[in-house]
Every structure is written in C-alpha cells, then in structure tokens.
Image (cartoon, helix red, strand yellow):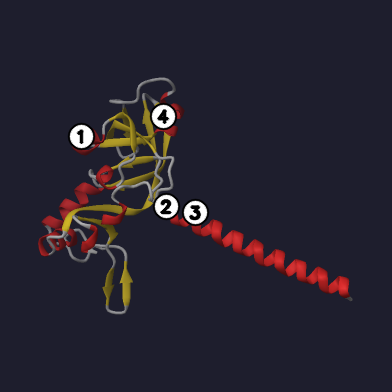
Amino acid sequence: KNKLFFFLTVLGLATGMTGIILALSYWEDESAYNQWNPNKDNIAEVIVHFNDNIWQWQVAPLAHYLKESAPEIEDFMYYKPYYSSDPATYQGKNIFLKNYFNTQANFFDFFPLEVTAGTAGRFKTTPNAIAIEEKQVFQIFGDEDPIGKVFQTAQGESLVVTTVYRNNRATSVQPNFLVKEVENSIKGGIKNNNWGDFNYGLLVKLKNKADF
C-alpha cells in the first residue's frame, strides 16, 4: 500500500513538472517572436470592431484615412494575410514559387530582415520586384548571382530579382519570396474609394511607443 502511494505521488509530481516545463517552453518560444525587430514596440495590427464582429481584413482607403486622422502614425503596410504558391519559369526551366507573401514595397521598413544580396531599396523602387529568401537561391540559381534575373509567372508577368534576404529568426512572417502585387490593388481601391473590399491585412507603425 505504501509502495503504491509512493508510486502515485512520484507519478503525479513527474506529470506536474513535465506540464510546467512544456508550458514554459511554449511560452518562451511564443514570446521570442519578433524580439529581434527594432520596430516591434511601434508596430500594431489594425483590427476593426464592426457591430458584434471583429474584422482583421481591411479595406484599401482605411490606412490613408487613419494617417490623416492620427498624426501618431508614421507609416502603414498592407499585405494579403496568407501565403500563396504559383508556378513560374526561369530561362525555360519550370520552378515553383512556394509560400510567397504579397505585401507593399515598404515591407523591409517594418521587418528589417538581413539582406545578403541586392538591397531593400531596390525592392521598394523596382517595378515587378521579387525578393528571395537565401535558402531558395541555390535551389533555383545554383552558384549563379540571382540579382537582376527574371522569372516569368504563369500569368505572363515578369518578376525581377532585386533582393536576397535571410530569415533565420523567430519572425511572425516566414515567406520564401516577397512580391508587391498588392500595390496596384491598393491604389485601385483608394482611387475608387472602395470601402467594401475587405481583402487586406494592415499594419501601422507609430512614431513613438507611448502612442499606443
């Protein structure tokens, strides 16, 4: 009887300690995300309370309205809140753009990932630019310099490689590729004053942390 009681006590303590260790490990992993980012305390996701609903998906004119109404906002960044994958070709070879992230040109202003080739500025200013995570470079180009190379998408669009980045930290976005096709749809939504097109995620960067 005493041996059984001792065994159950030890088992209960071991189970409890295991649970605590797992919970602490989970908390440590989750809290590590974006800690490397110098902008982390100044960036916020825009969430809209609409009647009894909470909307994460936003409309194109909203950011300009917010920036005009709130001088605390320094900048904003729209994005499609999911990863996409599409076939493409490079010099006649079929490739697959798996897990690309469709965002605005100022992505690196919000997530200043380490750039290992090209520049973040070229991604911002080059029409039809594409940025590539460095692990993907060898698979597509081998030892060839990827900067300036052109992909042809299945839709007939040409994407110019401007930037290679390294994403080896705990980051809330983990794309293999970055494109900025969302720019045109945002401009169209603003031009047409479209307040019913809930198609985008939206981040804002505040000038000061105290403005939250």
Identify the secondary structure beneath mark 4: helix
The residue pinned by badge 3 equals 29
Query: Which amino acid type is shown beneath numbered disc 1?
Result: Thr
Query: Which residue is drawn at the image coordinates 12% and 58% (left, top)?
Result: 192
Identify the residue under disc 1.
126
Q: Are marks 3 and 4 in contact (CB under 8 Å)?
A: no
Earlier in the chain: of badge 3 and badge 1, it is: 3
Q: Report the amino acid beneath label 2.
A: Tyr
Residue 66 position within the rendered picture, expressed as x and y whole percent measured from the top left = 16, 63
Q: Within 10 angstroms of label 3, few (less than 14), some, or many (20 or more) residues? A: few
Q: Which mark is residue 33?
A: 2
Q: Quadrant of the C terminus?
A: bottom left
* Position of 49 relative to 181 (above/below): below
Estimate how packed mark 1 is, as few (under 14), some (14 to 19) or many (20 or more) residues with alpha carbons within 10 Å.
Answer: some
Which quadrant: the N terminus?
A: bottom right
Cα separation, mark 2 vs mark 4, equals: 25 Å
CA gap, disc 3 and disc 1: 36 Å
- Residue 73 left/right relative to 201: left
> Residue type at mark 3?
Asp
Residue 50 falls in image quadrant: bottom left
